[in-house]
Amino acid sequence: MNPSPVAVNAADTNGTTMSQMQSVERQLREMILDLEIGPGERLTERWIESRFGASRTPVRAALLRLETEGLICRDGRGWTVSPINLAELEQIAVYREAVEVAAVRLTCALSDRSVIDDIEAMLDSCDDDTPREEWHSVGMDFHIELARLSGNDFLFRAVRDAMTRLSRARWLEVRDEAALGRAWTEHHSILAAVRAGNADEAARLLSAHIIGSRDRLVTSLHNDRRGLRARGFAVVAA
Amino acid sequence: MNPSPVAVNAADTNGTTMSQMQSVERQLREMILDLEIGPGERLTERWIESRFGASRTPVRAALLRLETEGLICRDGRGWTVSPINLAELEQIAVYREAVEVAAVRLTCALSDRSVIDDIEAMLDSCDDDTPREEWHSVGMDFHIELARLSGNDFLFRAVRDAMTRLSRARWLEVRDEAALGRAWTEHHSILAAVRAGNADEAARLLSAHIIGSRDRLVTSLHNDRRGLRARGFAVVAA
DNA sequence: GATACCAATTTGGGATACCAAGCTGGTATT
DNA sequence: AATACCAGCTTGGTATCCCAAATTGGTATC
């Protein structure tokens, strides 16, 4: 499969070298998150092998990693891209609420609030000309970066992993332009409260934002689950 | 290494069969949690291979899993049993507080409280004759089972994983008999509040318990870190 | 005695060969 | 026509082999 005796180091878009293991993991994750491989589709190790030109060792490492991220799951003897699970989405929102609120309270207690400017700039980089995919990704990063400011690695990773699990479902919802704008406004409100050091207000707004987003997301996916299934996406009811 | 053409299924203490992958993972995790391999010790894949009579494929799968659990970490090109990290212990406590309080609030809202009896029975199975290791393990399981009752899988797994990360440090503290009894009392108080459906009280008690435990643990390990290092355990300062 | 350098060994990353279990398609029997 | 059954193929699990890089230990040089 790799006739050259010289090890081939895969390269990402920035040109930095990485091991095959990391390369396969990253590429496969991207395909799953971008819905190039639909929820519910079967995966075989051999297919991934030939698709990415790697042997089974890095492929299996990538599969094990992605399994712990919840993006794929064992299906008897094989592998399946995790279905969109409405019950899971509801539970994740509760989990997010717990960890994000804890994180934002820590962040409000910080003395140095200049770092908040970076997040605000990120939000403001979106305007009417910005493609929706960008709005989507910035909306995710807002939550992740806000959690990072807490300084607590466990809260940060919890938020990041939760957003990873949510991102496919949110991607399906990108059609709703009004929801994107609404989230943008709420993000700004939350940030204002954080900047003011008002932890209770920030917590209240963030909590309402997360639960509100969940309700809209679950309703939207519930109503559209026929259409999603027609596109070949496995959707598990709540 | 395995001369028989018949696949050898490893068996746990209950006699249930499992793959080599699961077997190696379980046995290695147990050795690490029981401090049979000390924090900071180097691990080589070849050593694990010969130690458990498995080949490298299941060994590498186990290592990847244990890495995501935080029990081992990459050390340049090799593997190391994660050191006891005081800063990490402090952060985990904050994380635990967030998720456990959220979980116990959900549990308080449950209509069926009979399941609480099972947890109470677990606590009461410890008496003066019970070995300290058992107290230690019951104390961990209390938090895990309480989180399970919430019905939220993400909160549950978060608590379980946090307790796994904490368990080696808590094990070092088992010497302190007073702390074990104190925890037992506090666990009972929390359970009483849950049984009464008093979410605010349960949350308050649980929060105080977690933070109090953290402070005692960190103080204890900080004072004893010389002794721990003398025993060959890597301890990273806060 | 300290240091720079080189060879041998070790080690993790990757590739491949093999196996058993399970699935698939077809066939034979009723 | 329906069903039981079997051969062959697919696939994940495991073992083993190879390689490049890094570590190590010793040696020669200053």
Image (cartoon, coloured by chain):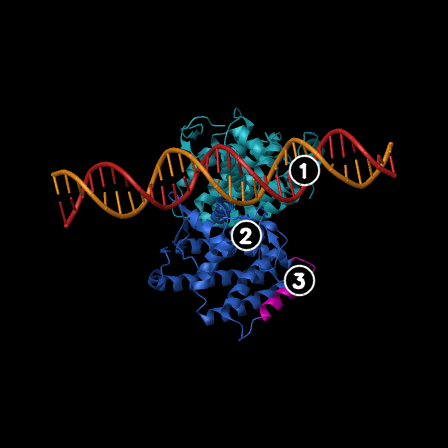
Chain colours: A cyan, B blue, C red, D orange
- Counting from the top left corner in percent of width and height, residue A59 is at 52, 36
Q: Chain of mark 3?
A: B
Callout 2 amino acid? Ser
Callout 1 amino acid? Val
CA gap, disc 2 to disc 3? Answer: 31 Å
Q: Which residues are magenta?
A: B109-125
CA gap, disc 3 to disc 1? Answer: 32 Å
In the image: residue B9, left or right of residue B1: right
How many numbered marks are there? Answer: 3
Which residue is label 2 attached to? B23
Q: Are marks 2 and 3 in contact (CB under 8 Å)?
A: no
Q: Residue at x 67, y 58 (%)?
A: B110
Q: Nearer the viewer, residue A238 or A212?
A: A238
Which residue is label 3 attached to? B115
- Counting from the top left corner in percent of width and height, residue A27 is at 51, 32
| B146 versus A111 height, above or below | below
Q: Does the magenta segment cover residue B124? A: yes
Q: Secondary structure at mark 2?
A: helix
Quarter of image, res B89? bottom left
- Dot 1: few (<14), some (14–19), or many (≥20) neighbours within 10 Å? many
Q: Secondary structure at mark 1?
A: strand
Which residue is label 1 attached to? A235
Q: Chain of mark 1?
A: A
Task: Tell me if I can see residue A127 in this picture.
Answer: yes
